Image (tube, rainbow, N blue to C red):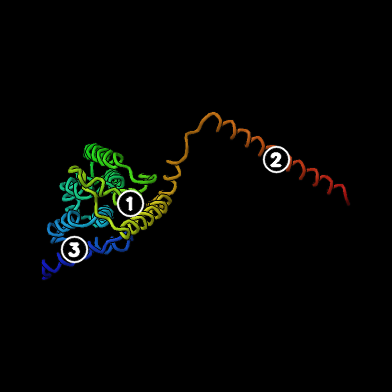
C-alpha cells in the first residue's frame, strides 16, 4: 500500500512546480486522481500551497484547479469538486488576500470564477457574492496605489505592469497598515508576464475548438449565426433572381447551339 506521507510530499512537489503549460497541470491532476483514496489530504495540500506560495505560484495553482476539476468530472469523481465548492472562499482569500498583497491576481481570479460557473462547478449566486467582495478589494488597492503615484505613467490594465507598480511603490505604501505591498523581484514580474502571455495564447486557440460530440460543429455555427431579417430576405431574393437569370441564359444558349447544329447535314 502506498505511503500517505510520500503521496502528500510528491503532490506538494508537483504543485510547487506548476507553470502555465497544460502538461504540468495535467500531470499534477492525474496524480491526484490516481491517488483519489487520499482526496482529503491532497485537497488540503492544494489549500496549503495556495496560502504559502508567492503570487505567481498562487495564480498557477488557481489555473490548475480549473483543469483539475475538468479531469475529475470527466473521470466521474465528484469528491474533489464538492471539496472545492466547500472551500472556494479559502481559495479566493489565498489568491487575492484582503490586505492587497495579491492585487495583480484579482482580474484573473474573476475570470477563473466565471469559468467555474460556466462549467457548473459553482452557482451564479456564489460567484456574484464573491465578485462583490473582490470589487471592494480591487477598489481599495487601486485607491492605495493611486494615492502616491510613482514617477512616470503606468497602465494598471496589464497584470505585469500592475505588479511592477506595486514593487516600485512599496516604500511609499509601507506606512499603510491596510496595504501590504508584495515583495516582488524583477524576475518574478517577467515570469508572470511570460506565463500570462502563454495562457492568453491558449485561450485564443480554445476559442476555435469544437467539442467532440455529434453535430457539435453544426450547433456552434447555428449559435453564432444571427437571426434572419428583412435585409437578409431581400439579398437572398436578389441572389436567387440573379442565379435564375444566369441559368435561363445558359439554357437558351444551349438550345440555340443545338438548333444551329441541327441545320447542318
Give the farthest residue toward the top: 230
Question: In this picture, is 227 found above or below 97?
Answer: above
| Quadrant of the rendered image containing residue 50 | bottom left
Q: Residues within 10 Å of mark 1 (few under 14, many from 20)?
A: many
Q: Which residue is mark 1?
A: 164
Q: Residues within 10 Å of mark 3 (few under 14, many from 20)?
A: some
In terms of secondary structure, where does tag 3 sit? helix
First in residue order: circle 2 vs circle 1? 1
* Disc 3 versus disc 2: nearer the observer: 3
Q: How many marks?
A: 3
Q: Which residue is mark 3?
A: 12
| Quadrant of the rendered image containing residue 184 | bottom left
Give the spatial CA distance, label 2 vs label 1: 65 Å
In this view of the protein, which residue sits in the foreground, 212 or 26?
Answer: 26
Q: Which residue is mark 2?
A: 246
Q: Is residue 54 visible from the viewing direction of this image?
A: yes
Image position, residue 242 (x, y; %): 67, 37
| Residue visible at 80% across and 43% down in the picture | 256
* Disc 1 versus disc 3: nearer the observer: 1
| Residue visible at 20% across and 61% down in the picture | 32
Image position, residue 201 (x, y; %): 40, 54
Question: In this picture, is 246 found above or below 26?
Answer: above
In terms of secondary structure, where does tag 2 sit? helix
Quadrant assignment for the N terminus: bottom left
| Residue visible at 76% across and 41% down in the picture | 252
Q: Is residue 70 visible from the viewing direction of this image?
A: no
First in residue order: circle 3 vs circle 2? 3
* Disc 2 versus disc 1: nearer the observer: 1
Give the spatial CA distance, label 1 vs label 3: 29 Å
Question: In this picture, is 190 found above or below 133?
Answer: below
Verify CB contact (< 8 Å) between mark 3 and mark 2: no
In this view of the protein, which residue sits in the foreground, 155 or 263?
Answer: 155
Amino acid at each position: 500500500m502506498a505511503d500517505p506521507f510520500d503521496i502528500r510530499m510528491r503532490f506538494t512537489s508537483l504543485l510547487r512546480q506548476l507553470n502555465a503549460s497544460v502538461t504540468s497541470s495535467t500531470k499534477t491532476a492525474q496524480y491526484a486522481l490516481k491517488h483519489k483514496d487520499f482526496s482529503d489530504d491532497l485537497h488540503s495540500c492544494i489549500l496549503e500551497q495556495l496560502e504559502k506560495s508567492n503570487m505567481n505560484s498562487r495564480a498557477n495553482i488557481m489555473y490548475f484547479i480549473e483543469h483539475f476539476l475538468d479531469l475529475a468530472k470527466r473521470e466521474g469523481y465528484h469528491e474533489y469538486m464538492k471539496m472545492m465548492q466547500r472551500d472556494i472562499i479559502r481559495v479566493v482569500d489565498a489568491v487575492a488576500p484582503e490586505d492587497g498583497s495579491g492585487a495583480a491576481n484579482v482580474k484573473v481570479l474573476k475570470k477563473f470564477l466565471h469559468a467555474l460557473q460556466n462549467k457548473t462547478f459553482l452557482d451564479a449566486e456564489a460567484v456574484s457574492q464573491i465578485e462583490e467582495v473582490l470589487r471592494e478589494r480591487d477598489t481599495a488597492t487601486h485607491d492605495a496605489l493611486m494615492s502616491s503615484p510613482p514617477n512616470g505613467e503606468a497602465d494598471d490594465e496589464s497584470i505585469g505592469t500592475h505588479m511592477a507598480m506595486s514593487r516600485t511603490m512599496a516604500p511609499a505604501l509601507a506606512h499603510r497598515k491596510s496595504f501590504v505591498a508584495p515583495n516582488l523581484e524583477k524576475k518574478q514580474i517577467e515570469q508572470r508576464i511570460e506565463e500570462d502571455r502563454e495562457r492568453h495564447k491558449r485561450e485564443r486557440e480554445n476559442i476555435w475548438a469544437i467539442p467532440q460530440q455529434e453535430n457539435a460543429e453544426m450547433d456552434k455555427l447555428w449559435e453564432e449565426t444571427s437571426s434572419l431579417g428583412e435585409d437578409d430576405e431581400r439579398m437572398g431574393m436578389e441572389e436567387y433572381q440573379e442565379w435564375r437569370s444566369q441559368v435561363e441564359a445558359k439554357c437558351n444558349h444551349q438550345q440555340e447551339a443545338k438548333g444551329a447544329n441541327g441545320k447542318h447535314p
